[in-house]
Image (cartoon, rainbow, N blue to C red):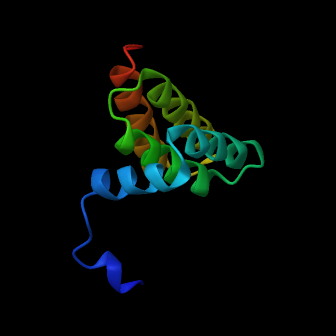
């Protein structure tokens, strides 16, 4: 793994920096949706998390994150992974006020 993953910056700090470099949260959300559309769910989930960490109070970001995690859950054969992905979706649904 990358050495930067040993004692990394907090997720929110890294995500805020990435969003700033991307020109805001919009490009990250768009890229997460694009990745999901071509079934690159691993990348879509990473980007959805980055967007949510950078904009923790943005309901539309959390709605997108919940949708992506539920889509990933539907394609996952592992029951444990299904549970984890569903929990992430529920977390964002609650944050978006959709619980």
Residue pictured at 65% horizontal, 47% vertical: 31
Q: Nearer the viewer, residue 71 or 29?
A: 29
Tell me: residue 11, above or below residue 52.
below
Tell me: residue 99, above or below residue 76.
above
Tell me: residue 39, above or below residue 55.
below
The number of discs equals 0
Q: Nearer the viewer, residue 86 or 8?
A: 8
Question: From the image, which quarter does the N terminus lie in?
Answer: bottom left
Residue at the top extreme, as displayed = 98
Residue pictured at 60% horizontal, 49% vertical: 44
- In the drawing, does residue 35 fall left or right of residue 91? right
Residue pictured at 69% horizontal, 54% vertical: 40
Q: Nearer the viewer, residue 22 or 78?
A: 22
Residue 59: image location, x then y, percent: 42, 22
Question: From the image, which quarter does the C terminus lie in?
Answer: top left
Residue 77: image location, x then y, percent: 59, 50
Residue pictured at 25% horizontal, 65% vertical: 9
Q: Nearer the viewer, residue 1 or 17?
A: 17
Residue at the right extreme, as displayed = 38
Residue 34: image location, x then y, percent: 72, 44
- In the drawing, does residue 6 fall left or right of residue 52? left
Residue 67: image location, x then y, percent: 57, 30
């Amino acid at each position: 793994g990358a050495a930067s993953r040993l004692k990394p910056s907090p997720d929110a700090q890294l995500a805020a920096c990435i969003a700033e470099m991307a020109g805001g949260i919009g490009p990250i959300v768009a890229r997460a949706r694009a990745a999901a559309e071509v079934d690159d769910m691993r990348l879509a989930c990473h980007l959805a998390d980055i967007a949510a960490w950078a904009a923790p109070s943005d309901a539309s970001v959390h709605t997108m994150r919940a949708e992506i995690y539920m889509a990933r859950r539907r394609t996952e054969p592992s029951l444990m992974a299904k549970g984890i992905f569903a929990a992430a979706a529920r977390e964002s649904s609650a944050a978006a006020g959709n619980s």
